[in-house]
Image (cartoon, grey):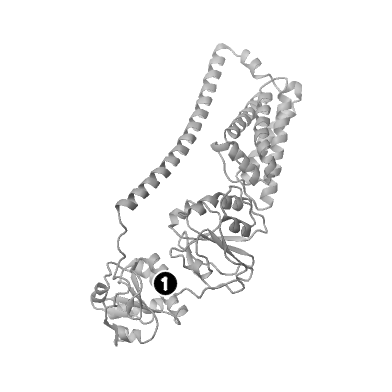
Amino acid sequence: MAFTTRLVLAAVFALAGIAKLLDRAGARRSLREFGVADALTRPLALLLPFAELSCAAALLTGAFAWWGAAGAFALLALFIAAIVVNLARGRTPDCHCFGKLHSEPIGWSTVYRNIVLAALAVFVLVQSPAHAGPGLVVWLRSLTAIESMFALVVLALAALAVFQVTMVVQLLAQNGRMMLRIEALEAKLGNRVEPAPPPAGLPVTTEAPAFSLQGLDGIPVTLETLRGLNKPLLLLFTETGCPACELILADVGRWQREHADRLLVVPIGRGDLNVNRAKALRHGLEHALVQTNREVAEAYQVQGTPSAVLLKDGLVASPLAAGPDEIRALMFGATLPDPVTKGDAAPSLELRDLDGKPVDIAAPRGRRKVLLFWNPSCGFCKAMLGDVRSWERTRSRNAPELLVVSAGSAEANRQQRFRSPVVLDPIFGAAGVFGATGTPSAIVLDENGRVASDVGVGATAVLSMLGAVPASGVPG
């Protein structure tokens, strides 16, 4: 049993040491994230795998097996202490235990795994140096011919398994690089061959088609009547029995109440008056109108529902927004508050996270918060992504919260693999309210939800707000 235990420990330490030597850059990054000073990461990235390989070699000999187990136990105790200290501080750097073969954020499962390995080392240590079992060479010589053949087959299968895993990792990495290059080429070719489609609906600045529709009280309402209220109009076209329409109508009643001072939202349904009246009561809607067929929708070139268009001063002021997400973005842009500066109270701004849930990005949370304005396709954002993710893994308990306010699709932002929450701002409207004009940039909100800093532009300024030290040489 002692000999088998030594073989298991030797295999683990040999694999870990070789994997770290093959990925020294990753090993240095992991040491840095664990809190090791930059000056020590390079020598330790070499000494640590050599120490692991030395323990593995000693465990395979008869004379030095006990000392190999002692060294393995010392290393494991050091690993456990470093992991527990970081977890206690709320930091979860990547363990990088087996280099590129296996690297994941540390957790209590990492502690338990190292405790099990440490227990195996203790089992060898309690045998005393004289009873730790034979060396590998002596054991192999004691085998019969059949046992030797079986051992060789097992060893060959193990070597083949390690080789296959290594090749799969390398192929996946190479495939990832090729896919990125192919996507870049396709993007370039696509930009050359396929022009962007024209915006849906009537062209912006076109005169808004006049209409006269029946209100829920049976009284006709014209476009001129609505314009007389001296507010921009958002015409929202819906259909009875449309699930997406029901989804957006759940927001419309709230929009009408919250933004009544700056915008008039006018739902336009179709069909039976009583059915539309019941729908308006269910959602708490005001100013709802009913068209007989699709006469007004066709005049505004509406192809499907729900759709919406913004009107100002009798003119079309926006492309046609189709679907709940585009309509929410149009509504968000049409009701943006006035810009704020340092010392002002941050206004309420509701955006959707990657799962479609509403988030008020300026809501006070009792601690400082950094709003990071981001774009997955921005080259400067890509350059500093590693530093932000490293800060997320190693942040202290006193670090500010981070909320990423990003352009782009939900899928593109999921690929950024932020641990902090991400909300989508496709029109870059929230950034404009806080005075940000590009990415990456950031602003700090204090514990009470007030703007506590000027806009920081570039990687150096953003990382300084987070309390992070740039490690990738990104431009400021």
The answer to whether 194 is drawn above or below residue 178 in the figure is: below
The residue pinned by badge 1 equals 331
Q: Quadrant of the C terminus?
A: bottom right
The answer to whether 55 is drawn above or below residue 348 in the figure is: above
* Residue at x-position 30% and y-position 77%: 275
Task: Judge whether residue 371 can be spotted in this image.
Answer: no
The spot of residue 192 in percent (x, y) is: 32, 51
Crowd band around label 1 with a 10 angstrom C-alpha radius: few (<14), some (14–19), many (20+): many
Q: Quadrant of the N terminus?
A: top right
Task: Label 1, secondary structure: give it.
Answer: helix
* Residue at x-position 43% and y-position 71%: 333
The spot of residue 451 in percent (x, y) is: 60, 70
The amino acid marked with disc number 1 is Met
* Residue at x-position 49% and y-position 36%: 169
The answer to whether 182 is drawn above or below residue 67 in the figure is: below
The spot of residue 42 in percent (x, y) is: 66, 38
Judged from this view, the residue extending furthest toward the front is 475
Quarter of the view holding residue 212: bottom left
Quarter of the view holding residue 151: top right
Q: Nearer the viewer, residue 4 or 93?
A: 93
Task: Judge whether residue 69 can be spotted in this image.
Answer: yes
Position of 339 with respect to 124 (left or right) is: left
Position of 17 with respect to 287 (left or right) is: right
* Residue at x-position 65% and y-position 33%: 46
Q: Nearer the viewer, residue 191 or 154?
A: 191
